[in-house]
Amino acid sequence: MTSPALAEPLPSSVRKPGRVKSLMTTYRVPLSIIALCLLPWLLPSKALAVNVLVYGVVAVGYNLLFGYTGLLSFGHAAFVGAGAYITGIAIGQFGVPWYAAVLLGVIGGGLLAFAIGALSTRTRGIYFSMVTLALAQLVYYVALQASSWTGGENGLRGFTVNKINLLGYDINFLDPVNKYYVLMAFAALALWVVSRILNSPFGAAIEAIRENERRARTCGYNVERTKLLSFTLSGTICALGGTMSALHLAFVPLDSLHYHASGMIVMMTLLGGASSFFGPFVGALVFLVMEDVFSLWTSHWQIIVGSIFVLFVLFLPKGIWGTFLARFVR
Amino acid sequence: MNAPLLAVEDIGVRFGGFVALQSVTTAFHRGRVTSIIGPNGAGKSTLFNVLSGVLTPSSGSIRFKGQDLKGTRQHEFVHRGIARSYQITNIFPDLTVHENVRVAAQASRSRYNIWTNRNRFSELDTKADSALEAVGLVAKRDEIAKYLAHGQQRALEIAIALISDPEVLLLDEPTAGMGPEETKEMVALLEKLASERTILLVEHKMKMILGLSDRILVLHHGRLIADGSPRDIQTDPEVRRVYLGQNDGYA
Amino acid sequence: MTDGIRNITRTNISRRRALAGLGAGASLVAMPWIARAADDTIRIGFPTPLTGPFAAEAKDQVKSAELAVKQFNDKGGINGRKIELLVRDDKLNGGEAATRTLELIEKDKVHAVVGSLSSAVQLAVNEVTRARGIIYVSISQSDTINEVKDFSKYTFHEALNPHMTAGAVARYSFKKGSKVAHLVADYAYGHEMLRGFKRAQAEIGAETVGEILHPFGAADYSTFMPRLRSMRPDFLCISNFGRDQANSIKQAVDFGLKQQAKIVVPVILHNQRLAVGPEVFEGVVGGANYYWGLESQLPSAKAFNDAYRAANGGAIPTDYGAYGYTGLSSLLMAMQVAGGTDTDKVIAALEVLKYDVAKGPQSYRKCDHQSVQSVLVLESQKKADMKGDADLFKVVANEAASEKVLRGCTELGFPA
Amino acid sequence: MDTELILMQLFSGVALGAILVLTALGLSIIFGMLGVVNFAHGALFMVGAYAGLWVASLTGSFWWGLLVAPVMIGLFGMLIEYFLIRPLYGRSIDDPLLLTFGLSYVLVEGVRIVFGTDGIPFPTPPALTGVLDLGVGFFPIYRIFVVGVVFVVVLLLWLGLEKTRFGLIVRAGARDPTMMRVLGVDISKVWLLVFGLGVGLASLGGVLSGPMRSVNPEMGSLVLAEAFVVTVIGGLGSLLGSIIAGLAVGIVISMTALFAPEMATIVMFALMALVLLVRPQGLFGKLA
């Protein structure tokens, strides 16, 4: 079980969060939203900023399972993909309005997460990671075969959203800034929901399971059911990320379901810091900006990203944000 | 005598060819301290695992307050009122002492509520602090559990077991690995607990067992070979043969 | 709601002006990563898979595209306006390509987009460009982009499609009564190639003795060989692409199928032949859009080769590399005719454009903007016959450009 | 479906199975003995193929490539264990998996930088080209040679592990490393050798697959999936399991190729998911 320490052990063994630390924890959602508002103006392009939103939501959703419940799933790309495909198909082939399509995508992705979760949470440790990888690859091949629905290897297209009607206002969704702030509303909602979940009694239960599954069971927690609920919630948030990506790119590539995509989500989460709430979002930001900037300099950018990831696993297991919190924030 | 609180009938446990427990039948009454002794591999921990739901027996049945526990899953045992501690310390390492106990208390209060803030359940804090009070760990409230001394971790283990206010408390070698000073403190704690609830104890320190127990069971090769008061056990010829034959149990 | 959304709705500015206003405002406020002053340079976006299995083809495409731009700039650009090529790495992934294209349009304000190699990536780029009214000239071989579902007036397809390549190869290779076995990759592009072969077989009267669909991206084909052999075909058509093509041909040869049947492929790839060597590919026949060997027959090919050699230290242009040149040249020539970058004028110019820049006469068909062009049929040479390292193929046929070889407009879903 | 074709299909299934066993062995040994999931296994398979090619082109003989490359890459594997995996012992079981996942990116891109992004021809050694008539059909001699090599390698491994002192130490080390330390065995040196052996086996698989599959930087990613499927079905950590599961998966894929060829890859993953759900420890493994 991955057990990144939730509590960064201070030099003394007491974990009494300092004034700044507790302030940051209580106001983590508003602080994150302020950061997101500034994001599009700091990054090289709005399109990249929206990608950071999408994968930030996916990574934070994934971390509910990986960092907080201690389960390393290698199949969460299936839920991101499912969310995107369902939204795209709903808009493209059934003319469903965009907000209903997003809802369908989230519910559909959540149901798929429940199904794969129900199967995979019966196993533990490395077997769990392997089952999620195998089941997600099955979803990849089903999408490849069902080309009349998903467009197969060519990917899903034909559902571009030009205009959206929000609270009576007609907004041009093709405009990069409008699109960013509409999708940022989704991201803010996702961050708030995950924060609420982590602060809830259920949040304490999953942390107990991460810390010591046997003791949690003896304390009276139904470990399998709690893991399944965490898996499903995590998959649902990832599906929301998928719907956002579908609206953003108006395209769903088949390789968004491949295990490489699942691996990328894990990399982002760990790079940012799996032991913190906002860490995965920072990981998504750093990963995508690094990829964007490095690929301009050299076509061999993957060797840089790979090496940085290896160094982080070795020396900074708490990731960028986790280490920053531990070192500089009292 | 009123009906037994916890009773087992013809319990058998088999791991492949090896027979860990064979036709064990006994009963435990409310408010008494019962110790289970026997050489290593006698089946003490196996019996404990059966009584706490960790292990489903190959044969036989368990009745708690008259109700058959067949099919009850392990996490439900504690809600029924049977809590246990482990031989090897088994706590939440990276949570603070207070959080360790609080999350245990929360299990019987709310498990799947994903919305309200956990700090709303303030009665859990008071419950946790009182459990820490009982085991003398209040001073260590915000210490991270894995940095505690061994004895303190054992005490925390018992606090966690206590927090669900169990009717039956199973303690698996609470003084294991403890020096004389810590053992003395633990025995004092056990005496205080014994007055409030039914305790089942697995231990090797005979002087402590004789002092504490109202009743002693002796297991040998998975069989119950003796069941009686401390004095009966000391004079029981079968027990003497088993013990004298093996080691000088009368420390 | 932030300022961005509020002022849009109140003043209800038209989309294009709002886009420019906000975009310009935004880029001034933003940290000046690359200050994109709105000068009069003509900017053309060029997404291509610089990382991944087709990196070599991508680099060739970039070199050829840059050659086309340089040639136009040397002649003073398009009525005085210099041309700039903005190359982006689409990493052979549709999602990445869509993001890069959004950046090219929103931040870099490109006037048009040319490029991409894989079918999925071109469709992703097309989705973004057609929604924003930006001309896109795709140079990826695919039938799908011709169909009305993905078509738009801004979409042009300069590359060959499997229907043309498979058809040309079939018409050259098969006779009436030839027995043909098919090994096909089980994905959209594979099915398109199979359909092209079967359509041509029906005309010629060649019989299909068997069909095996293999998993897309498989590495091992040994389990299909016994069945293929048991079909006793005269021709074995292997319809897949890239690494799949290299692996399947290599293993078919290992299993001795080349003794029994002639191996035929819809597209024979320059770099895959290099990756596998002359022995395995010897005698294999396949279609291609360009081969430098054309220079002995075509003056435009000679001119292109010489210009390419001069710019790239004597290297010769490959098949996929040439698409970079023909794609860019056709767009720039149309811009020349239209006298600038006004989208509608350039589209009108493209639709009537007649160009011969490398491989003979070409023109865009009106209904689906498919570039009607010749289809080469090449045969891979024996090592002994090769007059140099680059002398890989012999041009065995060069089917002239004609709309007859294309699928009809109505079949593609266009109004009669 | 005449019987001749089915027999031929069975044989090619066994041959494919042998290749799957070879690709899975390295992964299974490293997990079985060290509890480390090596996500860079596919990349090391590919590095082995390139090393074999490089040595063969230097010495002009395939045989030198076959012998030298696995040893060379095995030593490289030991460096990986010493510098990258060793610091992770004692930490969560997922850390080596994550590290090797990042490492696979580095290895693939490193080969792209050194050998270029396109494939390089790996000609079948002259002595082994051509086809053998088995009466039921024709089969490449080279693949029969590969089946032979796999048989020898598996035999040597079995003898090494079951019959030698070192084998005993390795197996005991897998079961209870702390006890081995107590008994005065330098377990970290054992783990170094075992990791090197696992990586060596992966690269041997690469060299042998060179002539069969085209050698290119991306050849490792599918091999990783195949190796995971076989290792998991056989039972993580059980050599016998990998061997039997490899052959079984080979035959299943071969048989599906007769009826629904496009389903071959789906069948692999479906089998893996089924085994993991019904019997997580696989056919022969012990529950981790």
Image (cartoon, coloured by chain):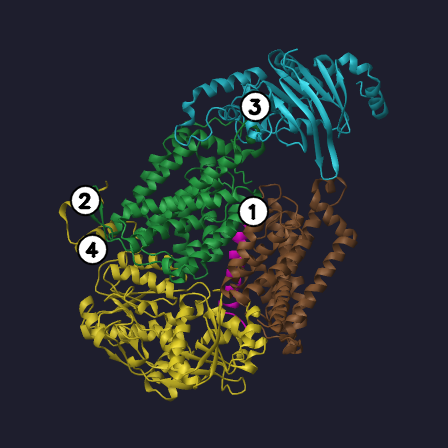
Chain colours: A green, B cyan, C yellow, D brown
Q: Is residue C245 left or right of residue C46?
A: right
**Residue situated in front as seen by the camera: D240 or D237:** D240
Residue A169 tag number: 2
Labelled pair 2, 1 in contact (Cβ < 8 Å): no
Task: Tell me the residue that label 3 is attached to.
Answer: B160
Residue C371 vertical position relative to residue C34 in the rendered view, above or below: below
Badge 2: chain ID: A
| Tag 2–tag 3 contact (CB < 8 Å) | no
Q: Is residue D56 left or right of residue C408?
A: right
For the residues marked 1 and 3, what is the alpha-carbon distance in whole angstroms? 33 Å
| Residue C20, label in figure | 4
Residue A96 appears at what percent x and percent y?
28, 50
Q: Please, what secondary structure does the residue beneath circle 1 have?
A: helix
Q: Secondary structure at mark 2?
A: strand
Residue A215 can be seen, yes or no: no
Q: What's the residue type where badge 2 is placed?
A: Tyr
What residue range appears in magenta?
D97-121
Residue that carries the numbered disc 1 in the rendered image: D277
Element on which disc 4 rests = helix
